[in-house]
Amino acid sequence: MPIHKNYIAGRWVDGASVVHDINPSDTNDQVGIYASSGRAAAEEAIDAAYQAFPGWAATSPEVRSDLLDKIGTEILARKDELGQLLSREEGKILSEGVGEVVRAGRVFKFFAGEALRLNGERVTSVRPGVEIEVLREPEGVIGIITPWNFPIAIPAWKIAPALAYGNTVVFKPAELVPGCGWALADIIVRAGVPEGVFNLVIGPGRDVGQAIVESRKVRGISFTGSVETGRRIGAACFERGKKVQLELGGKNPLVVMDDADLEVAVNVAVNGAYFSTGQRCTASSRLIVQSGIHDRFVKSVIEKLQGLKIGHALANDTQIGPVVNQTQLEQDLDYVRIGQKEGAKLAFGGTRLEREHPGFYLSPALFTETSNDMRINREEIFGPVASVIRVNSFEEAITMANDTEFGLSSGICTTSLKHSSEFKRRSAAGMAMVNLPTAGVDYHVPFGGRKASSYGSREQGAYAREFYTVVKTTYTQP
Ligand code: NDP
């Protein structure tokens, strides 16, 4: 098998060692071998990006737009093949893998347009004759550190705006899923990105990631991942006066009111809680259900879970793929035990499954009779595990929904205009959904949360410019 290399300063270069990319649906299947590097490679990449910055910042936005458009076109043209790679290395089912690739392609197309739309303002001065302009300029070198759960979409929605607005990039994908990051880098390189403008360094976070975060040549860090790592990165950036954007975890509530359409509520809950194996920061892990519909809702969710096919991510009839790796599987199983110890009733699933191929299969777990102060309702599990919390009123539901350290996404199933309006107004989350899963968002509008879920300005859509540009105010006496 060939070794897929890093891309640094316009060249494909070896790492210090290699990392083996293993298919979680079948651990006998090796997806590929990838370079694994340390601090030295990260520093070379940072130097290259630093040197390339003035030139890239000065290019015509049309050049940047054309590059992004070309990248988006190739991603979309290869959606099936890349979707297959994604499903093979991360474990989400093929339709979700292809869907994620399409999203990545669309993101590049969107920012191809945004590159041309970056403008400033002209403001009338309070001093007669003085002219004021408020301009937006690129920040400089941006370090992009991404997790394993969306291995092409998250890199895309960080790299595309960084390049669109004239920044240069050092990209470190999660070492667990280097395949999609490498494939994206290959597309960016073949689209003609100038030397040093985009660099890929594969390696462990504690070495490569840390070097990017600590470098004084890197002006900003865009990170998605765990709360613990994110907070450490945030503190390190603050110490160095670096701009930082963190997208961390969630403990997203889905409220189901007595007046909800039962079928809609069940579909929304099962999709939001369990699809993509529950490995989404926007997953609905707390199902807050009003007492009048509670028993019917629980019964219908269990029936739906009984019918779900859990298996190899690439099999046609699979609806839920495996957990990403052994560590995550153990974490999920630990939380199943914790929930039982806390007195929650395990109403369905939560057991390891054997399949034809050796993989990390887990039956989707549903807890009932839970309270919001249990650990399973307070900590991010990041697997196919959800809890039902019974409430008596809308007031109790909204209080419970907001009673969490996190605030990424939230949702309500209701047919009442009053409940839907009030929920959207009072939800303490960055995103609020009505009769839709808490996970699953558009690519051209802001994405992000409140409280411990996010830090810094929003990602995606035109709002992305807040992070990837810096404002300059000029005064002129003509
Ligand atoms: P991490 O937060 O540890 O990793 C995310 C990214 O940060 C990876 O690229 C990782 O590199 C890198 N990284 C790790 N340590 C450092 C560091 N000291 N400095 C700079 N970069 C670093 O998440 P994991 O992937 O290990 O997942 C752990 C848990 O995080 C999951 O079980 C889940 O609960 C949660 N998670 C949440 C996500 C979300 O979107 N909210 C996404 C993914 C995970 P590498 O892994 O290559 O070493």
Image: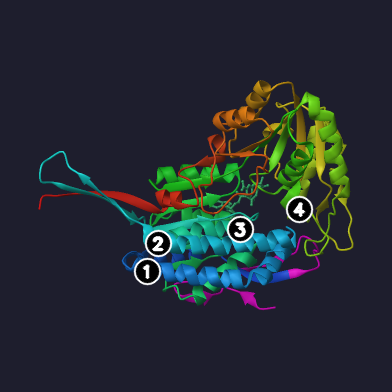
Kindly report which numbered mark, 2 or 3, lies closer to the viewer in this rendering: 2
Image quarter hosting the N terminus:
bottom right
Q: Is mark 3 within 8 Å of ligand 1?
A: yes
Please report whichever mark, 4 or 2, sits nearer to the chain's N-terminal start.
2
Residue 381 placement, left or right of 62: right
- Which residue type carries mark 1? Glu
Badge number at residue 62: 1
- Which residue type carries mark 2? Ala
Q: CA distance from mark 1 to mark 2?
A: 7 Å
Badge number at residue 174: 3
Range of magenta residues: 1-30
Q: Are marks 4 and 2 in contact (CB under 8 Å)?
A: no
Q: Which residue is mark 4?
A: 323
- Which residue type carries mark 3? Ala
Q: Which residue is mark 2?
A: 115
Count residues near mark 3 (Cα–Cα under 10 Å), then give few for <14, some for 14-19, many for 20+: many
Disc 3 is placed on an element classified as loop
| Position above or below: 450 against 276 | above
Kindly report which numbered mark, 1 or 4, lies closer to the viewer in this rendering: 1
Q: Quadrant of residue 385?
A: top right
Q: CA distance from mark 4 to mark 2?
A: 37 Å
Q: Quadrant of residue 173?
A: bottom right
Q: What percent of the width, then of the height, locates residue 166?
A: 38, 62
| Position above or below: 115 against 406 | below
Q: Name the residue rendered at 76%, 53% in the picture.
A: 323
Q: What percent of the width, then of the height, locates residue 73?
A: 54, 71
Q: CA distance from mark 2 to mark 3?
A: 27 Å
Q: How is the image coloured?
A: rainbow
Q: Is mark 4 within 8 Å of ligand 1?
A: no
Q: Are marks 1 and 2 in contact (CB under 8 Å)?
A: yes
Residue 310 placement, left or right of 18: right
